[in-house]
Image (spheres, rainbow, N blue to C red):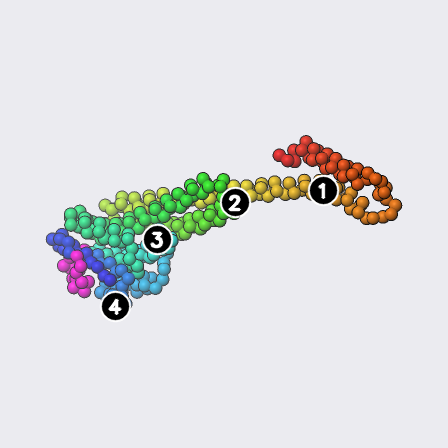
Amino acid sequence: MIRTIAIGKDHQLKLGIPLTDIQPDEYEWIWADFCDPTDEEAALLDTYFHFHPLAIEDCLYVLQRPKVDYYEDVHFFVLHALDPDHLTVQEVDLFMGYRFLVSYHKTQLEELDQAWERVVQHARERKIWARGTLGATYTVMDKLVDQYFPCLFRIEDELAELENRSRSESVEELMNQVFELRSRLLKLRRTIVPMRDLMYRVVNSEHIQGQGEHKAYFTDIYDHLLKLSDMIDADREMTADLRDSYISLNSNRMNAIMKTLTVITTIFMPLTLIAGIYGMNFQFMPELRWKYGYFAMLAFMLLLGSGMIYWFSRRGWFR
């Protein structure tokens, strides 16, 4: 599907004009949005717009890292949109020229719809026509970056809940949740950091004509990405601290268990030795035929065990 926005020379908005019917010289600027296009529609990138073959190849076949390439009269942007539920990445490609903007994405995205509605609204109010394709490009980038915040806020909420549940769940369950959160933070970082580097290039680029009056807008997006990067680093440090705390807690519990088992084993070792000796059934053994030998030996074993427990307690082994 291809939808179009066209701003005429008289600054009037026109929607839904078939792309093949648009003569670029007759309009101030146009925006063509390719959403899950057919092969015939995708071919218009070459036959109608005559974009560079390498840019078309990157657009059609490969999931690229966020980047910007400069051609003669076209700036090619590769952007990433995030699914807030699964953190899957969707590529959004932008071809920006002085009088046209082409967006290409293989699935319908809420961010692109919001940017489209915003451009249409401002065009009807004649607020954005003077900004042209650069203003529309900013709107698309801004909406894509705004969608990153809910993804990160959701992880931070789960991280806060995890800290509150640290006393009610087992260490194994907590560790699994920590590693799952770290994995999701890593997915976010793989998208946000390249987008941050891309926006740094855009802000400091001298290739984009007319950027001077829009630099503050792109700098604002760059500031958002810096904030997101700092939040991700802080969250990763927090999960690392939680992981180390849970590992230490698990080690302390294991040490306490081993100490208890060691004490019990130590107490029963001499008792087992005595029981083993008197279980050998030799004929000439002391007290073997004594009437009170059995009870005397039990009393001695009880006294020995109680004495060892008292001695261990005095040394603080049960603390």
The residues colored magenta run 15-29
Q: Quadrant of the N terminus?
A: bottom left
Report if residue 118 is visible in the image.
yes
Q: Which is nearer the N-term, disc 2 or disc 3? A: 3
Q: What kind of residue is marked 4? A: Glu
Q: Residue 268 — which label?
A: 1
**Distance between mark 2 and mark 3 Cα atoms:** 30 Å
Which residue appears at 18% of the width and 49% of the height? 121
**Marks 1 and 2 close (CB-CB < 8 Å):** no
Crowding at mark 3 (Cα within 10 Å: few <14, some 14-19, many 20+): some
Q: Which residue is mark 3?
A: 83
Residue 134 rendering spot, x and y as whole percentages: 24, 51
Q: Nearer the viewer, mark 1 or mark 2?
A: 1
Q: Are marks 4 and 2 in contact (CB under 8 Å)?
A: no
- Residue 301 horizontal/vertical position (percent): 75, 38
Q: Which residue is outermost to the front?
A: 291
- The residue identified by callout 4 is 40
**Residue carrying label 2:** 171
Q: Is 28 included in the stretch rendered in magenta? A: yes
Q: Amino acid at mark 3?
A: Asp
